[in-house]
Image: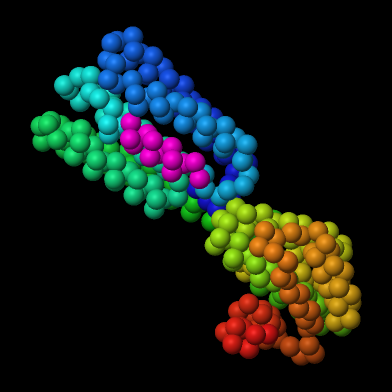
């Protein structure tokens, strides 16, 4: 899945867990009616687990990037597939149900982790469930399982590539809704040319959210995205008509403010800084934000302005820690 979670995804995954719980409950009841009492334990134990996962995921819909319940769910399902007692001497329904596992894994987890789960399950099935079957059966099952796994993997990767390609073409950052850096380069050329032709000033503000990497590392991508999304909303509310907002890099927002001198940029900086301190909360303590105003200098070329913008980003300075700025 991508880092930006579709609003319907958490509820869909929660519904999926609840459906699995119903399936396990039905399985336990069927096994009981069939008289295979030794096969009742696992589905009976896992049914309330999946109900709990579904309920928990439903109530924590927008707090996590990748579903934390997914690991527990996939481990529980793998446990069932590996250790549920056999009711037949042939390749049973458990092995065919295992074919759904890659689809579920790639839907719930990132690609690399999904591959690891699927390969571990395949190895476990071959060692614990299919070791007594013929080589032909083992090869057939392995080939079919791997085919489904690679189809699911291909779909997940192609979906991510399409999303990135669309973002590139549109020029918008999917998290903040601001224009991206590629679009900024195009607009700087136009705005610098306009400023020279009209002899009007051009200013900008760099808004660096220094806690973004820490939130991303310690609390997850979704909370980090929520943090920068709230900051972008405040920036947008403090912009005037005609100002443009960009996501310059992972933790930096850029406000392009035409017809504004450095003094006007300082006024906007002060107002925006107060709003961010009062309305933006960080889960890692007091807000750490730096807002840097810049103005187009006389005779400055676009490439020089872009270089000055890059050099003005505080978090990118290699000597930040040493100088303790």
* Left or right: residue 190 compared with residue 274: left
- Location of residue 155 by image quarter: top left
Q: Position of residue 1 (x, y in %)?
A: 50, 48
* Left or right: residue 25 compared with residue 268: left
Give the camera-side residue of 225 and 40.
40
Where are the magenta residues, as a range? 68-80
Look at the image and say whether residue 69 sits in the magenta stretch: yes
Look at the image and say whether residue 14 sits in the magenta stretch: no
Name the image quarter holding the C terminus: bottom right
Identified at 33% across, 35% down, the residue is 79
Q: Position of residue 279 (x, y in %)?
A: 81, 59
Identified at 82% across, 69% down, the residue is 273
Q: Is residue 212 above or below residue 2?
A: below
* Left or right: residue 186 compared with residue 16: right
Identified at 35% across, 48% down, the residue is 115
Q: Is residue 97 above or below residue 299?
A: above
Q: Position of residue 319 (x, y in %)?
A: 59, 87
Q: Is residue 313 above or below residue 245?
A: below
């Amino acid at each position: 899945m991508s880092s930006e979670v579709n609003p319907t995804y958490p509820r869909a995954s929660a519904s999926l867990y609840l459906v699995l719980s119903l399936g396990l409950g039905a399985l336990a009841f069927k096994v009981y009616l069939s008289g295979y009492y030794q096969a009742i334990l696992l589905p009976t134990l896992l049914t309330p687990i999946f109900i709990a996962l579904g309920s928990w995921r439903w109530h924590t819909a927008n707090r996590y990037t990748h579903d934390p319940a997914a690991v527990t769910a996939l481990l529980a399902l793998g446990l069932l597939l590996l250790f549920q007692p056999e009711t037949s001497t042939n390749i049973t329904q458990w092995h065919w149900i295992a074919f759904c596992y890659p689809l579920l894994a790639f839907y719930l987890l990132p690609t690399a982790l999904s591959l690891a789960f699927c390969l571990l399950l395949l190895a476990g099935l071959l060692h614990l469930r299919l070791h007594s079957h013929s080589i032909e059966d083992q090869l057939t099952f392995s080939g079919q399982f791997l085919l489904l796994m690679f189809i699911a993997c291909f779909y997940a990767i192609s979906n991510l590539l399409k999303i990135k390609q669309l973002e590139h073409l549109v020029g918008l950052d999917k998290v903040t809704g601001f224009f991206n850096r590629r679009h900024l380069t195009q607009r700087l050329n136009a705005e610098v040319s306009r400023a020279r032709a009209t002899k009007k000033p051009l200013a900008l503000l760099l808004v660096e959210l220094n806690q973004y990497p820490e939130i991303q590392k310690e609390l997850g991508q979704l909370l980090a995205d929520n943090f920068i999304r709230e900051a972008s909303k405040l920036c947008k509310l403090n912009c005037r008509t005609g100002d443009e907002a960009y996501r310059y890099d992972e933790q930096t927002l850029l406000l392009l403010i035409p017809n504004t001198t450095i003094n006007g940029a300082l006024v906007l900086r002060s107002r925006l800084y107060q709003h961010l301190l009062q309305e933006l909360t960080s889960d890692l303590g007091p807000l750490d934000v730096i807002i840097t105003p810049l103005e187009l200098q006389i005779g400055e070329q676009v490439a020089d302005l872009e270089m000055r913008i890059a050099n003005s980003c505080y978090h990118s300075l290699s000597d930040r820690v040493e100088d303790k700025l």
